[in-house]
Image (cartoon, rainbow, N blue to C red):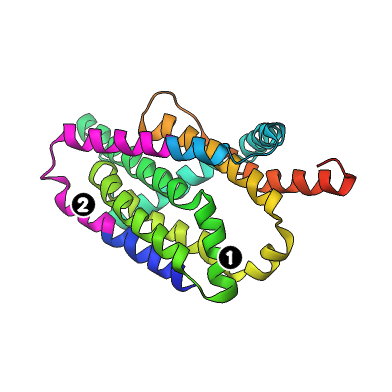
Amino acid sequence: MTGTFLNVATVLIGGALGLIFSSRLPERVRKTVVAGLGLFTAAIGVQMFLETQNPIIVLGSILVGGILGEWWRIEDGLSNLGGFLERRFTGSKTDHLEASAAQSDSDSRERFIRGFLTASLVFCVGPMTILGSIQDGLTGDFRLLAIKSVLDGFASLAFASSLGVGVLFSSLTVLIFQGGISLLAAQAQALITPDMMSEMTAAGGLLLLGLSISSLLELKPIRVGNFLPALVLAPLIVGFLSTLGIY
């Protein structure tokens, strides 16, 4: 799990630097930086989607995954987790006697949750996360995660300067998600075929595109977290079709 620990460290360092220098950056600069990240994230999402060999599989996994995510209320669960962390570690309290203070506290909590969710999804969705974690867990080779760590470090700096301290707490998501994959690497490697990885990568690309549209470019609200089951459904559909000899 060396690569995961390195990734967590770069997210924390980059986020801390972003918080330190955020007050020195004009609001227009921070918005431009986030917009740039949004455009880049959208481009990466499209690139990932183009790896699909069968778009119908990706469509099916996204639709069914979205229905399951809405049923399980995954986005609400992630938001509640972000709210809990914000209350627990930032000591935010609402003064019901002052409407302005209440509004300020509400804005602060919303900003924290947005930073936590956005950074968590950006850092944990993608082929580098899956492949790098498997490689690190199986052989101890963390070079792929080291490259991802550098990218995440710069991204967390930009995110934290605009979205606040919630970005730092996304390191917990990175630790649990990537660390869990590394610990289960042997089993995952035995089960996931290259075809499964391609469709899972394509589904992840759509999630990144949705995240870019919703949280970074703020074009249209999308509950991207509710589509997370698609990352599991896509390889399962490929495995099922392969068993039937269809894929």
Q: CA distance from mark 2 to mark 1?
A: 32 Å
- Give neighbour class at mark 2: few <14, some 14-19, many 20+ (Cα, 10 Å): many
Q: Main secondary structure of the magenta part?
A: helix
Which secondary structure lies at badge 1? Answer: helix
Chain part drawn in magenta: 14-42
Label disc, if present, on residue 16 of the rendered structure: none
Furthest residue to the left? 24
What's the residue at 64%, 47% (across, down)?
198
User: Would you identify the image quadrant in which residue 216 lies?
Assistant: top left
- Give neighbour class at mark 1: few <14, some 14-19, many 20+ (Cα, 10 Å): many
Q: Amino acid at mark 1?
A: Ile
Furthest residue to the right? 244
Q: Earlier in the sequence, mark 2 or mark 1?
A: 2
Total number of numbered discs in the rendering: 2
Furthest residue to the bottom? 140
Front-lying residue, 191 or 88: 191
Quarter occupied by the C terminus: top right
In-image side of 168 versus 234 (left or right): left
Magenta-span inclusion, residue 139: no
x%, y% of residue 106? Answer: 31, 36
Which secondary structure lies at badge 2? Answer: helix
Label disc, if present, on residue 19 of the rendered structure: 2
- Compared to residue 43, the image places residue 17 above or below, namely below
What's the residue at 43%, 60% (across, down)?
172
What's the residue at 39%, 64% (across, down)?
8
Q: Is residue 93 visible?
A: no
Q: Amino acid at mark 2?
A: Leu
Residue at the spot of label 1? 134
- Compared to residue 242, the image places residue 35 above or below, namely above
x%, y% of residue 226? Answer: 57, 38
x%, y% of residue 209? Answer: 48, 34
